[in-house]
Image: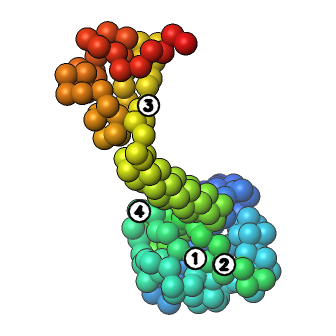
Amino acid sequence: MLEELRESNDRYVSLFKENHAVMFIADPAKNKIVDVNQAAVDFYGYGRQDLIGKDLHYIICSEGPGAEDASSNEMSPLFLKHRLADGQLRDVEVVTGPIHIENRTYTYSIVHDITERRRAEEERARLALEVEEQRKMLQTVIENAPAGILALSGNDLKVRWANQAFADVCGDTVWAELMAGKPLTQVSAPPLDLTD
């Protein structure tokens, strides 16, 4: 029996205490932190004893969606904001599940800091929106330009797009061939001499 307890304790130390992932154990009935590993102490910036016994909302900001589920036994990830000791808010992904210790069910949580990933996603979305706005503005300018404008691609010079002024200049037959995907060099009467 003593050997089993020692092995169980060794597993606990190995899987929880010495793990490099930020982890904590909570009592779902009281919504209190029961234990934290060293990675959690390092991440949050609080001393171990400062965290143990605290309400989960000591580190979980209520503004994050899913904060009320933080002590549930669900294994699906939660995306929350956690508060560090210095007041900084971090975006985190938390996976929580049940753990049985001394005939009681607790929840363990593994926390991944995704702040930089979130910032990169927001920046990518902002840039994509900016590029789309610029593309629309350029398209409007090109479509309304009084001169014929077209964009070609590939060695066979297929027309990717052209404005109405170009369509007016080249005529219906040539326009129909170009819009059907015929290379510029093979239309019945090429509108431009591209050899110069």
Q: CA distance from mark 2 to mark 3?
A: 48 Å
State the mark number for residue 76.
Answer: 4
> Going by the image, does 48 lie left or right of 193?
right
Q: Quadrant of residue 14?
A: bottom right
Whichever of callouts 1 and 4 sits on the residue coming sooner in the sequence is 4
Residue 5 visible in the displayed image: no
Disc 2: which residue: 89
Q: Is residue 195 above or below residue 134?
A: above
Q: Position of residue 4 (x, y in %)?
A: 61, 57
- Identify which residue, 89 or 120, lies in the foreground: 120
Please tell me how crowded label 4 is: few (under 14), some (14-19), or many (20+) other residues with Cα within 10 Å: few
Image point 26% across, 11% down: which residue?
188
- Identify which residue, 125 or 164, lies in the foreground: 164
Cβ atoms under marks 3 and 1 closer than 8 Å: no
Disc 1: which residue: 81
Three-letter code for the amino acid on which mark 3 is drawn? Ala
Cβ atoms under marks 2 and 1 closer than 8 Å: yes
Q: Quadrant of residue 184?
A: top left
Q: CA distance from mark 3 to mark 4?
A: 48 Å
Q: Nearer the viewer, mark 4 or mark 2?
A: 2
Whichever of callouts 3 and 1 sits on the residue coming sooner in the sequence is 1
Q: Secondary structure at mark 2?
A: strand
Whichever of callouts 2 and 1 sits on the residue coming sooner in the sequence is 1
Please tell me how crowded label 3 is: few (under 14), some (14-19), or many (20+) other residues with Cα within 10 Å: few
Disc 3: which residue: 151
Q: Secondary structure at mark 1?
A: strand
Image point 51% across, 87% down: which residue?
62
